[in-house]
Image (tube, rainbow, N blue to C red):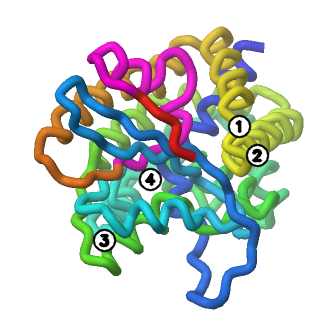
């Protein structure tokens, strides 16, 4: 159970970091899709300074409008948008692409046994791909290929809240900065997706693991659609209990750092929106909790 749940958390980790690059943005036409409610809070420091905290969804299907009217109204009065990573940056995209490859001259045969390669080939063939397509990729790159295929199965290839906010900020001349940055996130993801992790994932039943992972992915999105904090909290509790080490790396450590950074940024006196994956704001170890420990007052403004 623990190993299985760890694989699900790892899938969620990839979503947080790399799935921001999956999918495309709809053209600017009349949008009659239903809105997602999402998650929005206002945090007020002990000195009375405020910051708007927006929980984002990445990845997401294209069947809902993530950039709802509430978010657009908030952005109309925003000076600075702070995101995990500016995913519109060519430099960021280049780093992501390069980070998925093995050093020149190396192939997966240098890291995987023959039976492991055969299992990987079987998985890839179910998506119409060949082992040669990944022979020069590292553990992260291989996981990204599989994840992209899985998300396509459930049509989670629409725009993310993050990129929609970034594009709106650019369109309206709003400054953009980062709360983490790509180097920090790549360091985490490379720890999660080393060759040991790949080998372990090839030892479990792929179909059942995929089914459970995608079920959780859909649940995460449904909580976002409805702004369901209680439902999202139950998932965070389960993950904390079953896979504490991965949970600490992906949530606790990052949330503490995010709260510290927000407490620093709020002092510039600008109208700021901090937009990060919504699960960073959910549960006992959330950014909201750590801000409250600093004396902040938190209000849900959805």
User: Which quadrant of the view contains residue 233?
Assistant: top right
Determine crowd level at label 3: few under 14, some 14-19, many 20+ residues with C-alpha closer than 10 A: few
Task: Tell me: 100 left or right of 125.
Answer: left
Which is nearer the N-term, disc 1 or disc 2? 2
Foreground disc of the pair 1, 2: 1
Which is nearer the N-term, disc 1 or disc 3? 3
Q: State the separation of the CA atoms marked 3 and 4.
A: 16 Å
Foreground disc of the pair 1, 4: 1
For the question of whether residue 249 can be seen, the reply is no
Residue at which label 2 appears: 222
Q: Which residues are magenta?
A: 274-297
Viewer-side residue, 173 vs 221? 173
Q: Which numbered disc covers residue 228?
A: 1
Residue 48 vertical position relative to residue 256 in the rendered view, above or below: below
Residue 178 vertical position relative to residue 234 in the rendered view, above or below: below
**SS type, badge 3:** helix
Q: Which numbered disc covers residue 281?
A: none
Which is nearer the N-term, disc 4 or disc 2? 4
Q: Which numbered disc covers residue 90?
A: 3
Residue drawn at x 37%, y 52% is 99
């Amino acid at each position: 159970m623990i190993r299985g749940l760890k694989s699900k958390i790892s899938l969620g980790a990839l979503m947080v970091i790399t799935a921001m690059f999956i999918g495309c943005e709809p053209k600017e036409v009349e949008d009659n899709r239903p809105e997602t409610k999402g998650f929005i809070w206002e945090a007020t420091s002990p000195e009375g300074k405020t910051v708007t905290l927006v929980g984002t969804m990445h990845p997401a299907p294209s069947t809902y409008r993530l950039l709802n009217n509430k978010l657009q109204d908030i952005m109309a009065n925003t000076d600075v948008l702070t995101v995990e990573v500016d995913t519109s940056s060519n430099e960021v995209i280049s780093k992501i692409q390069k980070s998925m490859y093995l050093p020149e001259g190396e192939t997966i045969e240098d890291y995987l046994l023959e039976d492991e390669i055969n299992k990987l080939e079987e998985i890839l063939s179910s998506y119409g791909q060949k082992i040669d397509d990944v022979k020069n990729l590292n553990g992260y790159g291989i996981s990204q290929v599989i994840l992209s295929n899985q998300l396509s199965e459930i049509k989670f290839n629409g725009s993310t809240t993050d990129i929609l906010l970034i594009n709106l900020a650019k369109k309206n001349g709003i400054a953009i900065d980062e709360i983490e940055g790509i180097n920090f996130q790549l360091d985490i993801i490379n720890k999660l997706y080393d060759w040991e992790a790949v080998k372990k994932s090839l030892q479990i039943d792929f179909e059942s693991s995929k089914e459970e992972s995608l079920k959780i992915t859909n649940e995460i999105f449904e909580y976002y659609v409805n702004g369901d904090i209680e439902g999202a909290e139950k998932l965070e509790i389960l993950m904390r209990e079953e896979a504490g080490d991965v949970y600490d790396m992906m949530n606790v450590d990052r949330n503490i750092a995010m709260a510290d950074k927000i407490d620093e940024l709020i002092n510039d006196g600008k109208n700021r929106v901090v937009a990060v994956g919504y699960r960073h704001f959910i549960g006992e170890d959330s950014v909201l909790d750590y801000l409250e420990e600093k004396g902040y007052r938190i209000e849900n403004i959805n």
